[in-house]
Image (tube, coloured by chain):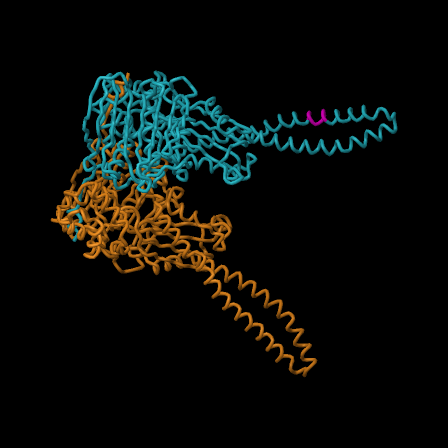
Chain colours: A cyan, B orange
Amino acid sequence: MAKDVFTQFKEHSVAEFFKKNKQMLGFSGKIRSLTTIVHELVTNSLDAAEEGRILPDIVVEVSEINKDEGRYLVHIEDNGTGIPEKLIGKALGMMLAGTKFHRYVQQRGQQGIGAAGVTMYSQLTTGKSVKVISGYKGKKVTCEVLIDIRTNKPKVNILNREPSEWHGLIYEAEVKDVKYDKSSYGVYEYLKRTALANPHASITFLDPLGERHIFPRSVDVIPPKPKPVKPHPLGISTSDLIDFAHYSKEPTLSSFFRNTFSRISQLKLDELRNYLPDINFRMKPRMLSWEQADRIVSVFKKIKWISPSSDGIYPIGEKQIKKSIYNILNPEFCEVVERKPKIYRGGIPFIVEVGLAYGGDAGRKIGSSRNGDVIRFANRAPLLFDAGGCGITDAVKSIDWKRYGIKNFDDAPITLIINVSSVHIPYTGAGKQALSSEQDLVDEIRNAIMDVARKMQIHIRGKVRERERATKIKSILKYVEQLSMDLAELADYSERDKINKKLIKLVEIKYSKTKKHNDNESESDNRSVD
Amino acid sequence: MAKDVFTQFKEHSVAEFFKKNKQMLGFSGKIRSLTTIVHELVTNSLDAAEEGRILPDIVVEVSEINKDEGRYLVHIEDNGTGIPEKLIGKALGMMLAGTKFHRYVQQRGQQGIGAAGVTMYSQLTTGKSVKVISGYKGKKVTCEVLIDIRTNKPKVNILNREPSEWHGLIYEAEVKDVKYDKSSYGVYEYLKRTALANPHASITFLDPLGERHIFPRSVDVIPPKPKPVKPHPLGISTSDLIDFAHYSKEPTLSSFFRNTFSRISQLKLDELRNYLPDINFRMKPRMLSWEQADRIVSVFKKIKWISPSSDGIYPIGEKQIKKSIYNILNPEFCEVVERKPKIYRGGIPFIVEVGLAYGGDAGRKIGSSRNGDVIRFANRAPLLFDAGGCGITDAVKSIDWKRYGIKNFDDAPITLIINVSSVHIPYTGAGKQALSSEQDLVDEIRNAIMDVARKMQIHIRGKVRERERATKIKSILKYVEQLSMDLAELADYSERDKINKKLIKLVEIKYSKTKKHNDNESESDNRSVD
């Protein structure tokens, strides 16, 4: 009986795995599936433009073929570098293949699964291949791409080759079992948020109803080319160190350290040596044993390091977030903070940005009230789904909002815009919609939120005090009228107006002084709170 | 410049992917990582016992090696079938290999990733191989297993072979960066919940503090051997149909339909033929075109089918859930429902069970109050993490608890035990801790919760009415004393006691009648609500 089951022992391809578990790639639910398709292709387009130092022009067209079947044609066109002919198949029809996975570089895509997943989804729902036109280095190639799911190998059928100066990529897929909806989880909202975080991109969206939405470029500066960064010693694991050492071509452990990791100066190297007198720093890196690596890693944790460089990391920027918030939400109060780079697990640097809008159109409108809203980004790509399982949400929930003058975040007219930038985002799944709740990340996001929340508290306190003061002045002024009449009777009746004015001025001066004094006080109060 | 990046184009193994994205396998956070290790191995042990028709005896031992480093030794021993020598490596040191992934059968593991993931985690954190002893068919093999991450191939070092009648598996891994904690997310709670849903298993846990916890077997019946089931035509996708057809060895389309899918009788076949007069049912299945398959699938959706058989699906059982609830929670009220099998996407049958406990020790104790608690299972394996992103949680949240006499679920002394059984659970990630929010699933869980909530409402209403009645009787009885005295004065004084008793009886009869009447009424009221 036991034999039975082992005769059925089999090996499977990663494509088979994701075919059976499409939901892990974001293909669950009709609206989400369509958004996933656009998400995977647009992030690739933005990455390709940045890589090629091009201001991205992206056109997304979704057209309805048969609404009842949920059959749509998705057409995405960019002006990026294109893909060389021999790599088109692997890039778009093979999972776990690409230029991003092994490099330590900030990009939106990072797994080499996304686009191949879309190709597979199209094929699984319609039986058709996707159509691709790539303009790369003077040649324009038109072809069809399929993925052989049992082997995870691409099948490419070249239709045409011609010389052309055009560069870019056109990807066209027919898909079924999807749905277009202008909801907050749909393609429209996805592209709107993408534009918000990528002001250098021009995005045109033609929706299935025939409407054309243009999200114009608002900044004419090409973001810096994403730069692979060296890992920071802090938090690197023994296994990583062994991997780096055994594949290193450096002649000695010393040069390996200096050239493989960031922040290892000659001074730091001497410090390392002092801690590890029995390790020969002139040995070949590939001779490093697990036991030695283990000890080196524990010394890494003892030494004081300069924070990782933020060279390879490009956040959206305070100015841009503020601009976007004022454009879209027209808030009563707005504050943005960009924190210093930090690191998490394995020496991976990251930067957190948080923008807070209060009042005006901030918050998610529900009926006549506005509820607290969180707009999440990772490397400038919007995260629309899986909010419940996201470390960003955990950070927002961990805040004691009462301390900042907000009774209940869920009922407050607040929008938080949170962007995490890193050379490696720890997504909870291959669908890339939520961040794992790594403690270092959650803590840092939490700190950033508290930064802006403190500023908001001052604003709210000011408002409350302003209201109280207005009430006080009003009640005092009631008596002023009577008082000035009484005083005028004692003195000269013609003085009444003069006395009245003087008294009003007195009240006003007194209360405006109190105001200034209190504000200063509350700010210093506050700073001591955390 | 563009050339640069494409020279770095590479293919990666699935092991490399999960090495870089350990969090997707459940390796994030020290407590969770340790729980994940135990989870993966214990589910394999339970599956192996069921497969071999054995009452499982499982011993889990976690011992501390170095607390500061988070270094522990995890030792898991079962009395299952063991693994044949030639498959030990692939089963425990290779991802996407195993007996479960491609079969349509209810088991806890279903991906062929879990155990290899644990082997990789041990190796990544300690540099060591795992130690395995397998007793299979009269031979006991002792070996060490590693995983070559760059190729996703196992490396096995056989240490000893000897004849032995013992069958089972011992798996021992040293791991770092984990933490033992008796919290609700830890190993202890995991095993406690496993025992709750697997009463046929005997589980012994030796914790790092030297304490021995025994969860004894409470049912001596081996659960039925999990049986691969045929897919149900309802909801099958065109791509699935093409796959089945092209790999089928049946001579005709007719025999292919009858033998590949469940619920296709001769009568249904005739119905299919009537809908599709131009398709030749005598053709070879591998000749089926996409267009034809597409039309067959849409006819599948038009025909009325018998629900899928629940043959292959084994829920915990109402009786057992009730027993567990009374044992653990000692509630004031308890109700359990096992719903009929339903299907979701691709004709996959599933069964939902929900147990509700109210009052007593139900709910999660926080300070002096008790908050609503949800204990989730999938195929009898506890889901401890990612509650926020789970379809079960979505279903609980979608309930309007006020309709059932509960102001706020979060503040109510309620425990919900929810188990979803299926031949394929749509997990949101490879870490298998949350169910994707597939509409069919969420709706069915919601319906099941409403079933038990209605019963609870009757109980709560009854309690409220009982309290009101008690108050009324009390206030009426106050007057009885006086009234009987007055009446006695008018009549014979010696009659006072008699009159008093008669009046009390009168009141009691009247109110007990009202009680019965009202209860009947409220129940029928209720049934008409949904």
Q: Residue B115 falls in which quadrant of the image? A: top left
Q: Check the image and report above or below for B167 versus A277.
A: below
Q: Nearer the viewer, residue A286 or B20?
A: B20
In the image, is B256 to the left or to the right of B216?
Answer: left
Residue projecting furthest to the front: B277
Q: Nearer the viewer, residue A288 or B400?
A: B400
Number of numbered labels in the structure image: 0
Q: Quick check: B444 left or right of B467?
A: left
Which image quarter holds the C terminus of chain B? bottom left
Q: Position of residue A418 (x, y in %)?
A: 44, 30
Q: Quadrant of the N terminus of chain B?
A: top left
Which is more toward the observer, A128 or B29?
A: A128
Where residue B2 sits in the image (x, y, percent)? 27, 18
The answer to whether A428 appears left or right of A244 in the picture is right
Whole-percent x, y for residue A230 in the image: 32, 21
Magenta stretch encompasses residue B467: no
Residue A299 sits above or below residue A122 on the image:
above
Residue drawn 52% across the image and 39% down it: A411
| Quarter assignment of residue B6 | top left
Residue found at the very far left of the displayed protein: B251
Residue drawn where x is 81% and y is 31% of the image: A483
Q: Main secondary structure of the magenta part?
A: helix
In the displayed structure, B459 sits above or below B142; it is below
Which percent across, then down, holds residue A254?
Answer: 29, 18
- In this view of the protein, can residue B212 be seen by the observer? no
Q: Residue at the spot x=68%, y=82% of the render? A: B493
Residue A510 covered by magenta stretch: yes
Residue A498: tell me if it is visible. Answer: yes
Q: Which residues are magenta?
A: A508-513
